[in-house]
Structures are given as C-alpha cells and as structure tokens.
Amino acid sequence: MLSVHVNAKTEGSAATLVVLPPRTLSVAPMMDWTDRFCRSFHRIISPNAWLYTEMVTTGALIHGDRARFLQYSQSEHPVAYQLGGSEPDDLARCASWVEQAGYDEVNLNCGCPSERVQRGAFGACLMAEPKLVADCVKAMCDAVSIDVTVKHRIGLDHDESETALHDFIGQVGEAGCRTFIVHARNAILKGLSPKENREIPPLRYEVVYRLRALFPDYEFLINGGVQTTQDIAQQLAHVDGVMIGRHAWHQPWDLQAFDAQCYPSLQASAPAITSRADVLYALKPQVLKWLDEGVPLRVIVKPWLGLFHGQANGRLFRQRLSNAVELNKNTWSVVEHALDAVLSPTISPDSSS
C-alpha cells in the first residue's frame, strides 16, 4: 500500500496531495556522502527508495547558509531531511524550514555516536534522555505536517537490556513519532570511533523484531548489515522496511535490484534504466546544469566511483574519474572518457573492482 499525506508545499494557496511510496527501502543519511549529488545519482538507479540527507545541525541551519543547506533537486523525491539537535524550539524552527523547502519527512538523529556530536549533546546520547527526545519530537510535530521520524540505536554502551529502549519508543511514540529507524547495534559512546561503532557492536536484529511486535501501531525500519536481496527478504519478514548504508555507496548498482524487490507493483512506471551507463546518460542533463552553475565535476562524480564495481575495467573507470588533472577540466568529456574504459571493446579487460 502507498503511504499518503498532504504535503504542506503548496502552489498558490492550495495544499497538494502527495502520494509517496512506502518506506520499504531507503538509503541511510551518511555524513560527507549523501549530499544532493549522491541522492540525484541514487534516484536514477532506484526510482522509489526514500533518500536521506546528511545530518545537518540546527545550529548550521539557524546561523549558517540556510539556502545552501536546504538545497536539493526535485527529482530526489521522496527525500527526507535529517536534523541534529536537542533543543525543542530550535528543532521546531528548523523542521518548519525543512517543510517549507519541500522535503517529505524530517528525521531526528538519535543514533550518531561520534564524540563531536556528543559534545553537542545530541545523536546517540539522546537515547538516555527519552523525555527530552519526546519534547523535541512533539515540538517538531506541532510545527509541521510532514512526518517526523527518529533514527536511533538499540541501546547504549554495553547495556543489552531492552527496558530503556522500550521506554524510549513509548515516550517518543506518544509525542507523535510513528516511524522509527533502528540501527540494530548498540552505540558505544566512549572508546570506539564512528567506523568501529558500525562494525564492532554485534548486530541484534531480534531486538528490532521484538519492537515491531510490542508496538504494532508504529512503523519500524531496520538498518545495519543489509547488503543483498536475501538480506532484504529476511528482514521484511519481520519489519516494515530496510535502510541500506554504506553498501549503497560502494555498490550503488545493487539499488536497482533492491528497488525491484521492494516495489514490484511500481516497476512498470519506472524509467527504463537497463545498464550502468544508462544511469550516467540519464543524469547528464542535470550534470551539465550543475557544471554551468559552477559545481566542480569532482564533487558531482564522487558518488559514481563504485558504479562499475565487479565489472571488467571497473578499476580503470574509477581511476579516470579520480584523476585530478582531468577532473579540473570540468567537462562532460571526462565522464565519456571514463565510460570508454568499460564500454570500449578495445580496452583489455580488468576484472578488478
């Protein structure tokens, strides 16, 4: 079933009814990775997945270049904006700007374990303060009509009891959150880097499955370790959706198969993208527009480097799109030269990826 809500984005004074696909598949918010260029690229491959921005702090939106931080392409829908913060009034103010910009969802980060985020008193450490998170969510829900969601971990440090987690879901749910995106690992707040926090704490999917059973009125998406169609099938037997993390960056073409698996009824209306090269040619008009606007080519193509993962001459494709001298030309011909590596029969195969 498609999820339907009235988006506050209007033409004139009339509200627009927006029909959105369910959150069966989404791509995680990833700092320094899921910028608007990455999201536009992923949208070509996956017509229906929900795409998430990098986390942006309330301070950045309030005191920084708000227009730049809120910028995105219309092709990205459905697209969600992730906020970092812990002050209800600031979050409500920023959520309102997010809705006015036309985003389909605003997400509160309660899962990032980095020390920098902890110093700002938000991210994963907020799981220890469910009432504060509930206050933040209520303020955001009161300020916007789009969905307010929360992304979090299953616990903090080495505490594997689920009592605090259930209390967190209960209080935040009562405040108005109906969708919880759960990274199925604990967050270790001291002693582990963000990278280690994605790998060392064990995945405990069964904890999320129990949440789904205990709180049947809420939607639960699972994040962590999902990398194949088999993984997705296993998870969807227990939860409402899956969120793909770094696999979407390293092997983005897999999103095509994931989209087909998660949205079989929507495939007939999807654009005809049948090859990896089709992705880049479909994106070409937008790339040319960005180049005309002065966006450096190196920024645009950064998310593309894994597109030909596992293909003959995939390494050469990456090398050509990583050559600083070539990228400084800021022309589409650089992309054509990289594509020649994998499309031209005259180049000797290199199965390395």
Image: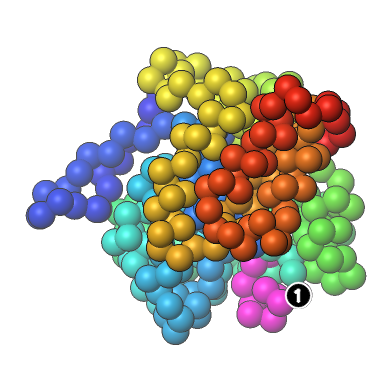
Q: How many marks?
A: 1
Is 216 situated left or right of 159 in this image?
Answer: left
Q: Is residue 227 above or below residue 36?
A: above
Residue 268 forms part of the magenta stretch? no
257 lies above or below 226: above
Outermost bottom residue: 63
What amino acid is found at the position of numbered circle 1 in the picture? Glu
| Callout 1 secondary element | helix
Give the prevailing secondary structure in the magenta stretch. Answer: helix
Q: How is the image coloured?
A: rainbow
Residue positioned most to the front: 346
The reply to whether the magenta stretch includes residue 122 is yes
Looking at the rendering, the stretch of residues picked out in magenta corresponds to 115-124
Q: Position of residue 89 (x, y in %)?
A: 40, 77
Identity of the residue drawn at 37% across and 71% down: 67
Q: Quadrant of the N terminus?
A: top left
| Residue 290: x %, y % from top left | 44, 56
Which quarter of the figure has residue 72? bottom left
Residue topped by disc 1: 115
* Residue 248 visible here: no
For the point 59% across and 24% down, which residue is it? Answer: 275
Task: Name the residue at 67% across, 27% down.
Answer: 343
Residue 214 position (above or below residue 228):
below
